[in-house]
Image (cartoon, rainbow, N blue to C red):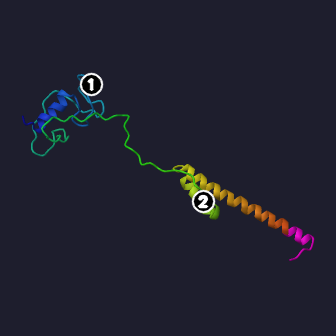
Amino acid sequence: MHLDNADILYYNQIMNKYCAKCGQELEGEAKFCTRCGTACSAVLPSRNDGNGYAPNGAPFPPVYGAPYAPPPPSPYYAPPQPVKRDGGSFGYALLGFLWPLIGLILFCVWKDDLPLRAKSCGKGALLSVILTAVFIVLAIIVNIFRVRYHIYY
């Protein structure tokens, strides 16, 4: 038996109780779709007039020999997201240590998306700034003692 588009639409709309516009499964003898509000009456849709669309503007499903009823969308399904490989490493800490400004910039850029990598960059930059400050303080103290005790090299 050959089924045309109108037969398939009738099967989807009446027998399986799916909305012809959005594909939402209809409950019981519903007159309207709960998702899109389209009227869902038990009247047979008019035959395809050749343009490939039903009178309500919904496209006819393709004909492959068997009726097609789209599964209702699941509220629990989410499309897979790309996996972000986050991990702190010595290389990012060294980068932040050698160039603290770059480490600080990378920390600010990555702190939400890649927190472990950002933490490595931030630690390296912070360690660099602290060691620089310690060496400056030590250099000042050494120079004060050199001047005070007249030690010249």
Residue farthest to the front?
90
- How far apart, in angstroms, are the residues tagged by discs 1 and 2? 58 Å
Secondary structure, mark 2, is helix
Query: What residue is pinned by disc 2?
Result: 103
**Where is residue 147 shown, x and y percent of the image?**
89, 72
Q: Report if residue 146 lies within the magenta region.
A: yes
Residue ID at (27%, 33%):
24
Q: Which residue is mark 1?
A: 27
Outermost residue, top direction?
Answer: 28
Q: In the rendered image, which quarter contains the C terminus?
A: bottom right
Task: Give percent across and percent down for residue 8.
Answer: 14, 35
Which secondary structure lies at badge 1? Answer: loop
Q: Which mark is residue 60?
A: none
Above or below — where is 66 with respect to 91?
Answer: above
The magenta region covers 143-153
**Amino acid type at image mark 1:** Glu
The x, y position of residue 118, in whole percent, is: 57, 53
Q: Residue furthest right?
A: 149
Q: Amino acid at mark 2?
A: Gly
Which badge, 1 or 2, is on the more N-terminal residue?
A: 1
Say above or below: 146 vs 2: below
- Viewer-nearest residue: 150 or 49: 150
Q: Quadrant of residue 6?
A: top left
Where on the picture, by quarter, is residue 95? bottom right
Q: Would you say residue 71 sits in the magenta stretch?
A: no
